[in-house]
Amino acid sequence: MAKVKTAYFCQNCGSQYPQWLGQCKNCGEWNTLVEEIVEKSPAKSFSEKSKQHIINIIEVETQEEPRITTPSEELNRVLGGGIVLGSVTLIGGEPGIGKSTLLLQLALKMKKKILYVSGEESASQIKMRADRLTELQNPNCYLFTETSVEKILHEAKKLQPDFVIIDSIQTLQSQLIESSPGTVSQIRECSNEIIKYAKQTNTPVFLVGHITKDGQIAGPKVLEHMVDVVLNFDGDRNHLFRLLRASKNRFGSTAEIGIYEMVSQGLKEIKNPSEILITKKFEELSGNSVAVTLEGNRPMLIEIQALVSSAVYGTPQRSCTGFDSKRLNMLLAVLEKRAGFQLGAKDVFLNITGGIKTGDPALDLAVVASILSSNEDVAISEHFCFAGEIGLSGEIRPIPQIEQRISEAEKLGYEKIFVSNLNKIPKKKYGITIVEVSKIEDFHESLF
């Protein structure tokens, strides 16, 4: 008979303790230890007749992982070409951001047998959402509203679907664990069973995960280690754009990004985000510039807005939306020290339009251009764009993949692009004027 014993689990990091403590020794959080009943089966005796054996790495034969190409090109790009058979993908995001809509659209678009398991919504609620996605219909999409992981896997083995979606992992519970759904031990046990099913049957599985107020996926951190792919679905809820990024991918790059727009019929893929993220202005205004950034292998043009004004209060304000505030402070210090611009007593507000967040250092040149434009109240031509990193000594540093950035700006009809003179630009003819600058002083003279 199985032994039943209790243990204390940290709800923040998943560490296990034999007795209650006020503070978790692993993550340092206070009052996060909760007692949970854990039922453990007796350990199996070691069998010497193991099928596995030691093998030299040179003798291992590699083979291409078979993939399922989805109807969503953005999802294919982020996953690295499609869904790998037997893989387990965890997708996390804020409530209402569109995780369930994204996966339901995927289930309705794919011409395969899909099992959609929901522990949060009834079948009629899911059908109402499916009816809103009017053009999408899949006669092989099956719904199952259940939270018991044993029943879910039993039905999945009977149905033998090509693809399984579970919404969400925090609502599932196993009969082997007597704690509540969403606790560390329940999430760990349910995830183990689902991953085992995926690997044994070679069936890809998508798991939806809730996130905490800090933006981390709720539950033990080991959950992200167990799955093959971790996707983050985020965006500003006041904007229509949603960004899909991979923070972990065993089968591809983590640098790619997928962009969607939330419309009344669901999530619409954005094929060319540059045309949407740049606003068409009827008059040129100071403080606006266009940066050529790169997300993975995808070049994008985004609009940077800056407002520089005299500080009303004693301490100047520094505010950023979509840009790193510490990097803004560094750029302002470089402008003050190296180029002689008096910005220490002025408020500086910076915004990346469209709710986009990016950490590409190539934005530095466009940010500086916006700040100088607003400070001098001189508008920058809407046909100019910028790509360059700025160092602490005021030099314009080279950036990677400059050819792709120049080609994207040329394709969208820009007339002039400012880049570092240290970049090795190929000598082929471009339909756009390339202005090479070395220092902020040269850049200011060339621009104004």
Image: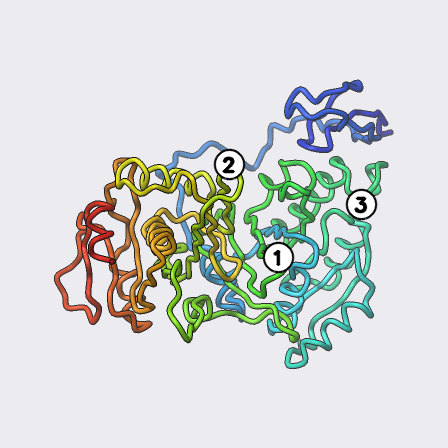
Q: Which residue is mark 1?
A: 203
The first of marks 2 and 3 along the sequence is 3
Residue type, label 3 = Gln
Residue type, label 2 = Thr
Residue 303 location, x and y as percent? 42, 61
The reply to whether callout 3 and callout 1 are in contact (CB within 8 Å) is no
The first of marks 3 and 1 along the sequence is 3
Q: Residue at x 77, y 39 (%)?
A: 186
Circle 1 sits in a helix, a strand or a loop, which is it? loop
Q: Which one is nearer the viewer's eye here, 214 or 335?
A: 335
The relative height of residue 348 versus residue 24 in the rendered view (above or below) is below
- Residue 284 sits in quarter: bottom left
Q: Which residue is mark 3?
A: 173
Residue 447 location, x and y as percent? 24, 58
The numbered disc on residue 296 is none
Left of 352 or right of it: where is 195? Answer: right
Q: Which residue is mark 2?
A: 315
Colour pattern? rainbow
The relative height of residue 143 versus residue 319 in the rendered view (above or below) is below
Measure the C-alpha gap from mark 3 to mark 1: 21 Å
Circle 3 sits in a helix, a strand or a loop, which is it? loop
- Residue 121 sits in quarter: bottom right
Measure the C-alpha gap from mark 1 to mark 2: 58 Å
Camera-nearest label, 2 or 3: 2
